[in-house]
Image: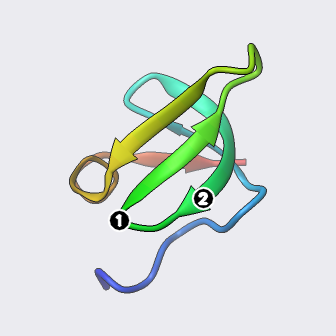
Amino acid sequence: MLLHEAFQLGDRIIVEGFEGTVEKILLSTQIISDRGERVIMPKAIVFTNSVRVS
């Protein structure tokens, strides 16, 4: 389970109130918000919280 992401590059996701398009998935997940802000989330946050994929 920890090796499989529920989303992929280009997907729009919402995690912990942050919403944006997935740009990178490495040791962290990076998204770009609609305002152009880069949000970097550690995998621990992604694996322990609900992720909405649209």
Crowd around label 1: few <14 · some 14–19 · many ≥20 (10 Å):
few
Q: Along the line of sight, which residue is nearer the eye, 32 or 50?
A: 32
> Is 47 positioned to the left or the right of 37 in the image?
left
Image position, residue 46 (x, y; %): 34, 52
Crowd around label 2: few <14 · some 14–19 · many ≥20 (10 Å):
some
Amino acid type at circle 1 is: Leu
* SS category of the residue bearing label 2: strand
Q: Which mark is residue 7?
A: none
Q: Residue at x 67, y 52 (%)?
A: 23
Amino acid type at circle 2 is: Lys
**Quadrant assignment, res 44:** bottom left
Image position, residue 40 (x, y; %): 44, 39
* Relative vertical location of residue 26 with respect to residue 18 in this rendering, above or below: below
Query: Residue under circle 2?
Result: 24
Image position, residue 8 (x, y; %): 66, 68
> Is 48 positioned to the left or the right of 7 in the image?
left
Q: Which mark is residue 27?
A: 1
Q: Residue at x 30, y 58 (%)?
A: 43
* Relative vertical location of residue 4 with respect to residue 52 in this rendering, above or below: below
Q: Residue at x 63, y 20 (%)?
A: 37
* Relative vertical location of residue 49 with respect to residue 5 in this rendering, above or below: above
> Is 15 positioned to the left or the right of 9 in the image?
left
* SS category of the residue bearing label 1: loop
* Relative vertical location of residue 14 with respect to residue 49 in this rendering, above or below: above
Q: Residue at x 52, y 69 (%)?
A: 6
